[in-house]
Amino acid sequence: MAVKEIKYKKKRLGSFPFLNVLLSVTVALFVLGLLGAIILQAKRLAELVAQNIEVQVFLNSSVDEAERQKIEKIIAAKNYVDANSIRFISKQEAAKELISELGKDFTEILGENPLKDSYVLRIKPGFYDEQKLKKIAGDLEKISGVFEVSYPQTITGTINRNIATISFVLSSLALFLTITVVILIHSTIRLALFSQRLLIRSMQLVGATDAFVRRPFVRNAMLIGATGGVLAAALVYGLLQYFISQVPEMQMLMDERLLAFLGGGLVLFGMLLCGMSCYHAVNKYLYSSLDELY
């Protein structure tokens, strides 16, 4: 009677169910990376909106050409002013624009042009806060020859409140999602090592040091984490490119440098998280009793 030979697959120290673990890590990092990309896009959108806020500096009617140029130099020297954005609007140009909007020549009714020469400028990033804008307006009004400084206070306040609300929501979501990803990846690595627990103990019993047993597992886990990070970053970038192809206006929200940092962060985060999770999981089986292993 023939005896059927049963073959057992030899387990290799440090081996993982590679595809299963890689898929879990990639999905977790992809979701985290997608949220990171959304935060970057929201930040960029807030900057673009804030950059379109214009401050108008009205000059006294008695200011002559020499004084006007002196005022312009003083304004351009301010550390909060984008010097390249400064443009002069004469009262004649302002009157033409207003007549075009109203459809009537108000100067014929009033008998004169009551408007004033002005400078329109934009503020540098970092000075869009409502309190800072108030201080900026006060500082500009102290310049000799300046009649009044105007900016859209209501819109500015609304924008700042909305930005603060969105930032809080996205930050809270990012924190919650990061904790979830850490728990998910840690659990995935621990379950993947469960089938190796007896091999780990066997190596320990034949005299292998803890570091010798631990090293191949941690190395492979870090490789899986790095690979998952690369795949997740590629998926996030590909998805953003798809959205841009559908909505070309989104291109202005793209910052390739920050996206590169995000991709590198996903790779580094995945590598370190998988490595640390594996380190703790192997230690658990190294220091467990035989009863706990079964």
Image: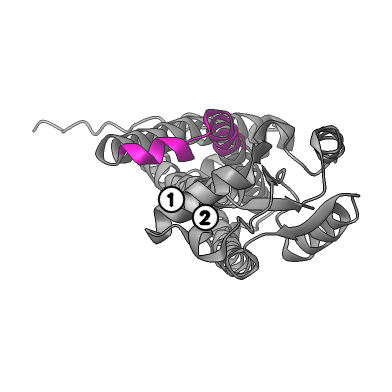
Asked if the stretch drawn in magenta spans residue 201, the answer is no
Q: Which residue is mark 1?
A: 31
- What span is colored magenta in the figure? 248-268
Density class for disc 2 (Cα within 10 Å; few <14, some 14-19, many ≥20) is: many
- State the residue in front, 180 or 107: 107
Image position of 223 with respect to 21: above or below: above
Magenta region's main secondary structure? Answer: helix
Residue sitting at 88 percent across and 55 percent down? Answer: 139
Q: Is residue 4 left or right of residue 134?
A: left
The image quarter in which residue 11 lies: top left
Q: Identify the element where label 2 is drawn.
A: helix
Where residue 178 appears, as percent x and y from the top left, is 57, 56
Tag 1–tag 2 contact (CB < 8 Å): yes
Most distant residue in the left direction: 1
Image position of 242 with respect to 172: above or below: above
Q: Which residue is mark 2?
A: 181
Residue sitting at 86 percent across and 49 percent down? Answer: 145
Where residue 99 appears, as percent x and y from the top left, is 45, 54
Residue sitting at 16 percent across and 33 percent down? Answer: 4
Where residue 237 appears, as percent x and y from the top left, is 41, 34
Residue sitting at 85 percent across and 60 percent down? Answer: 138
**Of the residues shown, which amino acid type is indicated by label 1?**
Val
